[in-house]
Amino acid sequence: MLGRPSRSGVALLLGGVLVLFVGVIAQLAVTDGLAETIWVAVSIVGAVIIAIGIAVLVRHAARHAPPED
């Protein structure tokens, strides 16, 4: 059974999703040429933050896993 996830991992995942959400809002608010640049940059940053969050959660789960028989 999985234990409690790390707070930092969950925070990074939520932060990455928030970055992507803000990127979508920013894309709708600016002109066409700048919107694509903002979307690419925000997508990369959001994906990196989410990947780091997943890595933190996996590391935490491996560290706190019950010993195998």
Image (cartoon, helix red, strand yellow):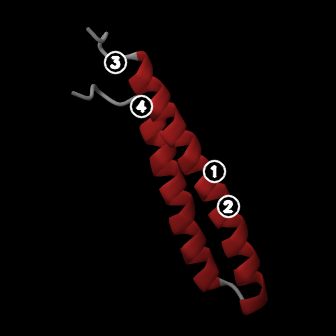
- Name which residue type carries label 3: Ala
The residue sitting at 37% across, 16% down in the picture is: 64
Q: Quadrant of the C terminus?
A: top left
**Looking at the image, residue 53 lies above or below residue 35:** above
- Distance, label 4 to label 1, CA atoms, is 18 Å
Of badges 3 and 1, the one in the foreground is 3
Sequence-wise, the earlier of marks 4 and 1 is 4
Q: Earlier in the sequence, mark 2 or mark 4?
A: 4
Find residue 66 and name its label. Answer: none
Amino acid beneath label 4? Arg
Give the number of the mark in front: 4 or 3. Answer: 3
Local SS, label 1: helix
Secondary structure under tag 4 reads helix
Front label number (4 vs 1): 1
Q: Give the CA separation, mark 1 to mark 2.
A: 6 Å
Assess whether mark 1 and mark 4 are in contact (beta carbons under 8 angstroms).
Answer: no
Q: Which residue is mark 2?
A: 44
